[in-house]
Image (cartoon, rainbow, N blue to C red):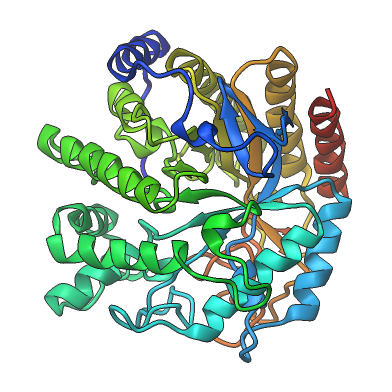
């Protein structure tokens, strides 16, 4: 949604070094638990599990808990099929939406986990229970995010709508993304929103799984609690005061999560510089707290105007150079802060921006391969890049709608309701893309065996 602004890598690293001095920590407090309890831990700039290296070979499957639900939205047979397919691809981690908020706008998922403050859909929470059990069977882990800066799961703007009584403005309709982002970021300053948000966090973290009787806080299948999907400090006009409010919010909520559960990792869900109004110091400061265990970043060369899907040959080289720079500079930033970093979102359209499952994926495949070609050598050198999650897994999901927009009752896909179904998601028939992912995952698992 926002356009590219060139940034200085030197300035980025200087900001990270500055934050390092302020932070003065070399290891997460989450590493203090028993060494062999199965929890993913941080050791310097890497993850470990049971004392062994643990690199993330992952995908985004925001709807996975929905499939686990015993209600009509669930499809447990499909969930098993998807997890088996992903396991065969070498995927060991999912990034999943834990909580959604009921919204009346068309571009949001329905049903929702919360139908007003304190009003939870138990069947969807049971879907999360079921998912955790199925992941454990396959020795997979999960990152669970509690909220969303964007509207497709209700998110921060829905919190504010419940508080002020004003209807949520759908930026897909109004095209006012600046106004939408400002409203979403007002969530950080609302006492009522923050209290209700913490109530929901507590509801999830202190939950006992109805399938296996295990407390979530004791479940090593959960790798990390995450504050939100792509939280931003505001829009392009974000002030210094608003940046500080954002940092204070991160510091306060991560400390609260650790007070409830000191053993699981905590992450922000940040996009990196592009989610930090291109302010390197802000990104560094947002990840410098002892309660933030690792850095996250996302990379969208088409969304950010670096690559034109309708002019792929003409815009590829310059777009990829910016993307490669973005990938590398964030790994360098993690090195300066002395924490691991995960590239937890990236993706590209099918050729010429088609949503048709039969459309080719030549440029997407090229993109995936070149991203992996940047990450793998740095992983092999022991640098802080600790894994990745591609966006996103559509698997066996299909749409029959000629306009490709999701409606309630349709198959759930990795492409959320705010986007056309088939935009970025990888289907189980995308054999060339899957082969590239599987080859990279094999290389990652070789590192896990060292």
Q: Is residue 218 left or right of residue 156?
A: right
Give how far across and how far down residue 198 sits, in percent.
30, 61
Residue at position x 45%, y 77% in the image: 113
Q: Is residue 274 left or right of residue 137?
A: left
Q: Is residue 214 above or below residue 303?
A: below
Q: Residue furthest bottom?
A: 72
Residue at position x 35%, y 79% in the image: 103
Is 236 in front, or is 352? 236
Q: Is residue 6 above or below residue 32?
A: above
Q: Is residue 274 above or below residue 78?
A: above
Is 353 in front, or is 296? 296
Residue 407 visible to the viewer: no
Image quadrant containing the C terminus: top right
Q: Is residue 307 left or right of residue 148?
A: right
Q: Total of numbered circles in the picture?
A: 0
Is 332 in front, or is 338? 338
Residue at position x 67%, y 59% in the image: 354
Q: Quadrant of residue 84?
A: bottom right
Q: Is residue 190 left or right of residue 196?
A: left
Is 121 in front, or is 151? 121
Residue at position x 73%, y 60% in the image: 135
Residue 117 visible to the viewer: yes
Q: Residue furthest front?
A: 34
Give how far across and how far down residue 205 sits, in percent.
45, 61
């Amino acid at each position: 949604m926002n356009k590219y602004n060139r940034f200085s890598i030197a300035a980025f690293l200087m900001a990270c070094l500055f934050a390092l001095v302020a932070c003065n920590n070399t290891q997460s407090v989450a590493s203090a638990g028993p060494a062999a309890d199965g929890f993913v831990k941080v050791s310097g700039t890497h993850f470990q599990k049971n004392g062994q290296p643990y690199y993330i070979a992952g995908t985004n499957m925001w709807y996975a808990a929905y499939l686990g639900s015993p209600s009509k939205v669930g499809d447990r047979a499909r969930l098993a099929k998807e997890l088996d397919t992903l396991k065969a691809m070498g995927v060991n981690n999912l990034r999943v939406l834990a909580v959604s908020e009921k919204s009346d706008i068309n571009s949001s998922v329905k049903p929702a986990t919360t139908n007003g403050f304190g009003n939870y859909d138990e069947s969807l929470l049971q879907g999360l229970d079921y998912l955790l059990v199925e992941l454990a069977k396959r020795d997979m882990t999960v990152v669970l995010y509690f909220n969303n800066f964007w509207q497709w799961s209700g998110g921060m703007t829905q919190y504010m709508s419940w508080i002020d009584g004003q209807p949520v403005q759908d930026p897909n309709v109004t095209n006012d993304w600046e106004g939408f982002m400002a409203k979403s970021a007002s969530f950080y300053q609302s006492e009522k929103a923050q209290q209700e948000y913490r109530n929901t966090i507590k509801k999830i973290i202190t939950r006992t799984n109805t399938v296996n009787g295990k407390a979530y806080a004791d479940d090593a299948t959960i790798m990390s609690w995450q504050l939100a999907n792509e939280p931003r400090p505001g829009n392009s006009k974000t002030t210094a005061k608003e940046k500080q409010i954002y940092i204070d919010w991160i510091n306060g909520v991560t400390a609260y999560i650790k007070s409830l559960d000191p053993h699981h990792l905590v992450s922000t869900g940040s996009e990196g510089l592009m989610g930090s109004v291109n302010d390197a110091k802000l990104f560094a400061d947002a990840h410098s707290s002892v309660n933030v265990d690792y850095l996250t970043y996302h990379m969208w060369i088409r969304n950010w105007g670096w690559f034109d899907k309708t002019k792929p040959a003409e815009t590829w080289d310059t777009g990829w150079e910016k993307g490669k720079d973005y990938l590398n500079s964030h790994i360098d930033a993690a090195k300066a802060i002395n924490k691991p970093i995960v590239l937890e979102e990236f993706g590209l359209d099918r050729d010429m921006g088609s949503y048709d499952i039969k459309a080719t994926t030549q440029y997407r495949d090229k993109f995936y391969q070149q991203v992996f070609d940047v990450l793998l050598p740095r992983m092999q050198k022991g640098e802080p890049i600790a894994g990745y999650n591609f966006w996103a897994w559509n698997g066996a999901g299909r749409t029959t709608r000629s306009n490709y927009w999701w409606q309630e009752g349709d198959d759930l896909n990795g492409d959320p309701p705010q986007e056309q179904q088939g935009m970025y998601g990888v289907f189980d028939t995308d054999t060339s893309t899957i082969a590239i992912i599987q080859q990279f995952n094999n290389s990652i698992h070789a590192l896990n065996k060292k």
